[in-house]
Amino acid sequence: MIKREIEVPENMDVRELFGRFDENMKLIEKAFDVNVSLRDGAVRITGPDEAVEKSADVIHMLITMLCNGESIDEQKIMYAISLEQESGGIDVSSLGADCVAINIKGQPIKTKTLGQKKYVEAIDKNTIVFGIGPAGTGKTYLAVAKAVMALKRREVSRIILTRPAVEAGEKLGFLPGDLQNKVDPYLRPLYDGMYEMLGGEGFLRYQERGVIEVAPLAYMRGRTLDNAFIILDEAQNTTPEQMKMFLTRIGYGSHAIVTGDITQIDLPGDKRSGLKEAMKILNNIEDIAFCKFTEKDVVRHPLVQKIIKAYEKHDEEIERRKNRMKKNDKN
């Protein structure tokens, strides 16, 4: 057992560091099996040698975040803890330093994980970016934020949002209403991001002027999309033919973001995923970037990370059983 003390800056509100009822420090205590307390303006950590060092690293990160004007919450603390446990200390205190966009309420939108940070940097540097990973990692939300900022800065003249309507087999005729009404249920996640960035009225004004266009993927065929920011969501449900068709629509001055989760493919069993195929075919082409998110990048309730991990473990076990059965059949 060892003891270590970390000085808290004089101008820092210790309550922000410790959290309500010391809930922030309790997360660290539980994760590393240490005891954390406040003594004479310093954070005192006691416990096993390695656990104390890891706990100290996390607390240093949190102090740096607060000194940089960042707030800390459960998601940030658990993310710092998970990286410290698995990677041996990656500094996440710089997260949130850069503002991705400003929402309709004037609040800054910032990256919350290293995966998100790399994703945003890739969007700034490449014409086509693939964001691949589980739900809740912010891949669609950040894509919408970047699209709106590009429009406001006049880097593009329009935004195009599209998504394959797989559940309806791309045949939307049986749904009530006009094309917009038929497509709306499939594009709700994209709308949610737009409403937060532009507000309901602002979004509708842009849409009425044709500056923002929402359409099913099938309606992209035969078009050339110049000077546009194009987002293809739920791309795991495209066929290879649809993916090729979409990527070859891109014209001069355009940017495209393709988002999807290859563990959530809703295509019929005999259909290949265009996203999975694109990952193999386009992996080494310049100006195309692939950003892969993991359960650590999930910024929803911490329980979501555990659910995703449990399902991944289950799927891996099923795959191992299939491989064993194939091996036994050959023998």
Image: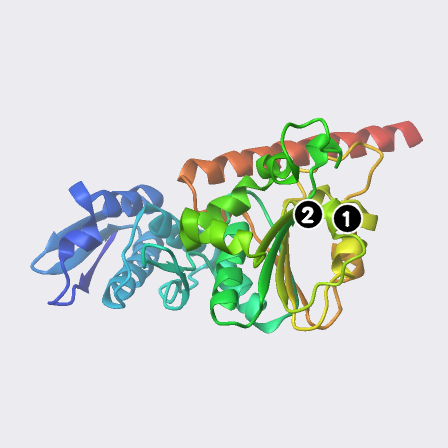
Which residue is at 48% across, 71% downward?
153
Q: Which residue is mark 2?
A: 235
- Looking at the image, residue 202 lies above or below residue 182: below
Can you name the residue that lies furthest to the left here?
A: 40
The amino acid beneath tag 2 is Ala
- In terms of secondary structure, where does tag 2 sit? helix
Which residue is at 54% across, 47% downward?
190
- Looking at the image, residue 284 lies above or below residue 238: below
Numbered circle sitting on residue 48: none
Q: Nearer the viewer, residue 38 or 194?
A: 194
How packed is label 1: few (under 14 Cα within 10 Å), some, or many (20 or more)?
A: some
Quadrant position of the C terminus in the picture? top right
Disc 2 from disc 1: Cα separation: 7 Å
Q: Nearer the viewer, residue 213 or 167?
A: 213
Q: Which residue is mark 1?
A: 274
Relative image position of residue 6 (x, y in whole percent): 20, 63
- In terms of secondary structure, where does tag 1 sit? helix
Which residue is at 53% across, 61% downward?
147
Residue contact between numbered discs 2 and 1, judged by CB atoms under 8 Å: yes
The amino acid beneath tag 1 is Gly
Q: Quadrant of residue 278?
A: bottom right
Please give left or right for residue 175 compared with residue 327 in the image.
Answer: left
Can you name the residue that lies furthest to the front here?
A: 209
Can residue 196 be seen here?
A: no
Dot 2 or dot 1: first in sequence order is 2
Q: Nearer the viewer, residue 280 or 87?
A: 280
- Looking at the image, residue 304 lies above or below residue 153: above
Relative image position of residue 176 (x, y in whole percent): 64, 27
Please give left or right for residue 136 compared with residue 166 in the image.
Answer: left
